Image: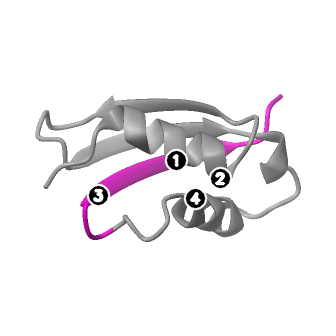
Amino acid sequence: MAMNPGDIEDMIKEGIPGARVVIRDLAGDGDHYAAEVVSEAFRGKSRVQQHKMVYDALQGKMGGVLHALALQTSAPD
């Protein structure tokens, strides 16, 4: 049961309003993605806190429907 990259992007944008999100399918199997998420909401937060915000936005899909997500997060320059 794979997850659509557009759905991943939409969930992150809904959970982190104003975020710029780019999703790439790493293996072509719909289970392994990379996400680059840039948001002002990340400013002053640790990398762990930033990643938790993304995982929270995915509403429990990580490790289940969404098997693997390589995250790159940052605040805008």
Q: Which sits earlier in the primary sequence, circle 4 or circle 2? A: 2
1 or 3: mark nearer the eye: 1
Label pair 4/2, CB-CB below 8 angstroms: yes
Q: CA distance from mark 1 to mark 3?
A: 12 Å
Q: Residue furthest right?
A: 44
Q: Mark 1 or mark 3: name the one nearer the start of the chain.
A: 1
Q: Which mark is residue 11?
A: 1
Q: Are marks 1 and 2 in contact (CB under 8 Å)?
A: yes
Q: Secondary structure at mark 1?
A: helix
Q: List x then y, in percent, for residue 68.
A: 29, 57
Task: Judge from the rendering whether residue 11 lies leftward or rightward of residue 7; answer left or right.
Answer: right
Q: CA distance from mark 4 to mark 3?
A: 13 Å
Labels 4 and 3: the sequence-earlier one = 4
Q: Write down the region rendered in magenta.
A: 63-77
Mark sitting earlier along the chain (3/2):
2
Looking at numbered disc 3 in the image, what kind of residue is underneath it?
Leu
Residue topped by disc 3: 66
Residue density around tag 1, few if under 14, some if 14–19, many if 20 or more, within 10 Å: some
Q: Which residue is mark 2?
A: 15
For the N terminus, give its image quadrant.
Answer: bottom left
Instruction: Tell me if residue 29 is in the magenta stretch.
Output: no
* Amino acid at pointer 4: Ala
Q: Observer-nearest residue: 67 or 71?
A: 67
- Contact, mark 1 vs mark 4 (Cβ under 8 Å): yes
The residue singled out by tag 4 in the image is: 57
**Amino acid type of disc 2?**
Gly
Q: Residue at x 53, y 37 (%)?
A: 36
